[in-house]
Image: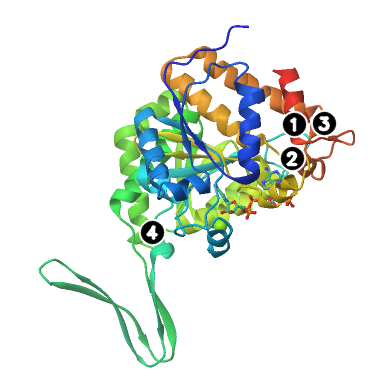
Amino acid sequence: MKKIQMTTPIVEMDGDEMTRVVWQMIKDKLILPFVDLKVEYYDLGLKHRDETGDKVTIDSAEAIKKYGVGVKCATITPNAQRVEEYNLKEMWKSPNGTIRAALDGTVFRAPILIDSIKPVVRTWQKPITIARHAYGDVYKASEMRITEKGKAYLVFEDENKNETRTEIYDFECPGVIQGQFNKDTSIKSFAHACFKYAVSTKQDLWFSTKDTISKKYDHTFKDIFEEIYENEYKAEFEKLGITYFYTLIDDAVARVIRSEGGFIWACKNYDGDVMSDMVSTAFGSLAMMTSVLVSPDGKYEYEAAHGTVTKHYYRYLKGEKPVMNPMASIYAWTGALYKRGEMDGNSELYEFAEKLEKACIKTLDDGIMTKDLTLLCNNPNAVKVDTETFMDEIVKRI
Ligand code: NAP
Ligand code: MG
């Protein structure tokens, strides 16, 4: 069989632990036999990040800027215990955080749906994608505990030391205050990433804040989205038959629950943090959650939403066969192959990505799955298999 050719490389970022083992298996079994794979490879395994002083992470982010498409395996974000376990020179930052900052990107998370696993919400038939603005607000806020009577102000000092101030509260008893901020540049990047992703996936975009209460802060988000939509994306949306829809966050929650899914829900930082856990749990399983980082200028980095599945790795090191669900990692690859094919006008490549996804779904629909899913699914004939057997069954169906 002649392998599918590629013109431009995909930036491949290898990772850690169980996902690193399964990553290699995905390439060997599901991709390399079919595609003459062109990648620019970066080893983001913790050992190599430590050896390079984390330069490899920065280099990989630069490579994504250059080539436009990346695919990333899950990586360890070190804590004190990892520093000891791997004898690290430093407690390196989260690679995902580093790459997100370098690309100024927004993360979109969407579940993979199969017939035999019903979402908790009965009306949901299509995936709901959450886009979370990952900058500022309460995550970069300054806080103060007030212990006595007195007045709290919000004060802005310009470069010439002129002050603008507004009273927050005249405290008659102890209390708390908090100062939050965001930047127009960051909100604009978020808006562009959301509109671009809606166009790229041909889905409606919803955006929600609480602008009726937060008349300056949240209203700024609403206005920036509105302006960018009107000036830069409206025509494209209309051509594709998709809509941009703004509503209050509480109204959005009610509508999301009653919806059948199939749209992108853009959320401010805190809302996105909370809502993405709610939506992913209601859809079923973290092992079936895909994730893509999109930059405002349209660069894409695909990955699984879950981590390195450490507990499974320790069992694997003791000689047990891998039983990790590889679906989200496979979909990171199909996402990247599809996007590469689309960008390069390489139809063989994106058709292969579609075929591979279909083969995965067919395998699951046939009741062949890893144990995390047999526990959730309502197919009485479901068979529990290990990771390798699951992939062999996918190959039979490609
Ligand atoms: P995790 O790796 O997502 O795993 C948590 C648990 O969820 C697993 O023990 C497993 O449960 C289940 N699980 C997750 N994905 C699965 C899959 N594909 N198949 C089957 N079961 C799956 O989270 P963690 O244990 O909190 O974190 C481990 C490491 O990952 C940490 O070092 C963290 O820094 C890193 N991390 C990386 C990323 C990233 O690179 N994007 C994201 C999150 C965490 P059972 O053990 O019950 O089977
Ligand atoms: Mg959270």
Element type at mark 4 = loop
Vertical position of residue 293 compared to residue 90: above or below:
above
Mark 4 and mark 1 residues within 8 Å of each other at the beta carbon: no
**Label 1 sits on residue:** 388
Q: Earlier in the sequence, mark 4 or mark 1?
A: 4
Q: Is mark 4 within 8 Å of ligand 2?
A: no
**Label 4 sits on residue:** 136
- Write down which quadrant ligand 2 falls in: bottom right
**Label 3 sits on residue:** 367
Q: Residue 163: x percent and y percent?
A: 17, 73
Q: Quick check: can you spot residue 283?
A: yes
Mark 2 and mark 1 residues within 8 Å of each other at the beta carbon: yes
Mark 3 and mark 4 residues within 8 Å of each other at the beta carbon: no
Q: Is residue 103 left or right of residue 375?
A: left
Mark 1 and mark 3 residues within 8 Å of each other at the beta carbon: no
| Residue kind at label 4, given as amino acid type | Gly
Q: Earlier in the sequence, mark 2 or mark 1?
A: 2
- Classify residue 122 by image quadrant: top right
Q: Residue 136: x percent and y percent?
A: 38, 59
**How busy is the neighbourhood of tag 1: few (under 14 within 10 Å), some, or many (20 plus)?**
many
Q: Residue at x 34, y 30 (%)?
A: 66
Q: Residue 126: x percent and y percent?
A: 64, 35
Q: Earlier in the sequence, mark 3 or mark 4?
A: 4
Q: Residue at x 46, y 23 (%)?
A: 340
Q: Quadrant of the C terminus?
A: top right
Kindly report the distance in space between the C-alpha atoms of the residues bearing marks 2 and 3: 19 Å
**Label 2 sits on residue:** 322
Kindly report the distance in space between the C-alpha atoms of the residues bearing marks 2 and 1: 7 Å
Q: Is residue 326 left or right of residue 163?
A: right
